Image (cartoon, rainbow, N blue to C red):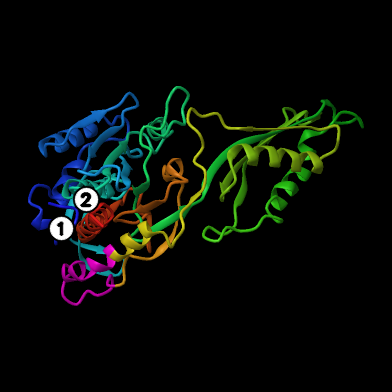
Amino acid sequence: MSGADPPETTEEFHGFDPVAFLEEAVQIPSHRDVTEMREFLVGTLTDHAIDVTVDDAGNVLAEKGSPNPTDGPHVVCNTHIDTVTPHVPFERDRNATVGDEDGVDVIRGRGSCDAKGPLASLLFGFLATDPDRGRLTLAITPDEEVHSLGAAALTGRLDGTEDSLEGDLYAVGEPTGLDVCTAAKGRFEGTLELSGETAHAAESAGTNAVAAAEGALKAIRKFDLARSPHDQLGEARLTPTTIEGGEATNQVPDRCAIVVDRRSIPPETAAEFSESLELDVRAAVPDDVGVEFRLTERKSPFLAAFSTDPDHHLVDELVAAVDATRPRAIDGLRAGDDSRADRGGTVRPFSAATEASYFSPAPTVVFGPGDLADEEGAVAHSDREYVRVNEIEWASEAIARTLSRLLEDD
């Protein structure tokens, strides 16, 4: 199948059924160990005559070249195979009630939407595309839900590694409700340490580190007042989440620790945030109070914020593909059910931190079937996780069409 001729429906590409793949994948636990799930993915690719590599970091890598590899973009499709705990059993419910909708065909189970559903759709698009120019890489990581060491190694962000992808365009599979997400806030975490000097509480002596928290918290509240919001992501957010200090009820405390959660916007880095916060708190507490801010230790870099121009042609192609496949998706709904007719295709930010951070500043979009949450509450990372079968097929066709357009001859 050439880059110019994507499959009209998932049924027309008989070599791979994304729904059947997902039904098997959801039944494979991957919340503590991804080995079995990785073997299933590698076996699926091998069965379709695709050469597969598993690197030292546990990433699954497959590539499709073209007759003109340097005359077109290198497009990378990425998502992850790990899930959070605990495992949720698989169920195919063809007559589910979701919100105020009845008779919905869904697949339930841990990973159904985060992110084995997006994986099934990306895998379909990869297998269905034969590039006319440029090249196409499938890069599936093993530990996005924990430390993202796989993605960090792939992109040269760990000591002793280098960027082995060097992609021009990236499509990252996450549950977006078939919207095309062009930005996401980053997430940093650290501890603000205030230090003083102990003394008996009955004496006017010592330096009270807990009392100094009043000024520190005020500095945290005011931290972003002079910072401009991002045009896609809005304002950054800084939240004190835990506080701890003091050892005895009759003693001036010499230590207070405040943990903060930072939801960043471009172009802020973790190092810049750390330096700025420490300076602001230093100016807000008494001179005899020691101030130190330390980012939480982790083996991989924090996931920083990223953004892609909403007018980039990668975004345009994916939005057009969602719309082009919409009539078939709506036809697949039950008669009289038009509540999902306007689903998908909106350009918006993604609401969670993601490994897309590591691929920036290359143009990157986050896209996939399923939802992080619905009208009833959490979907991903919950015991009611599900994905609509209709959306697996719809996303699969949209991705195949997009890859075809990006990698076809001009």
Does residue 368 lie above or below 208 as drawn? below
The magenta stretch is: 321-341
Tell me the tag on residue 204. none
Of the numbered discs 1 and 2, the one sitting upstream in the chain is 1
Q: Quadrant of the C terminus?
A: bottom left
Whole-percent x and y of residue 291?
75, 33
Residue sitting at x 72%, y 38%: 278
Q: Which residue is mark 1?
A: 5
User: Label 1's element?
Assistant: loop
Crowdedness near tag 2: few (<14), some (14–19) or many (≥20) residues, C-alpha within 10 Å: many
* Mark 2: amino acid: Gly
Whole-percent x and y of residue 20?
13, 48
Q: Looking at this view, is 101 or 327 the one in front? A: 327
Does residue 360 lie above or below 8 as drawn? above
Q: Which residue is mark 2?
A: 125
Residue sitting at x 20%, y 41%: 25
Nearer to us of marks 1 and 2 is 1
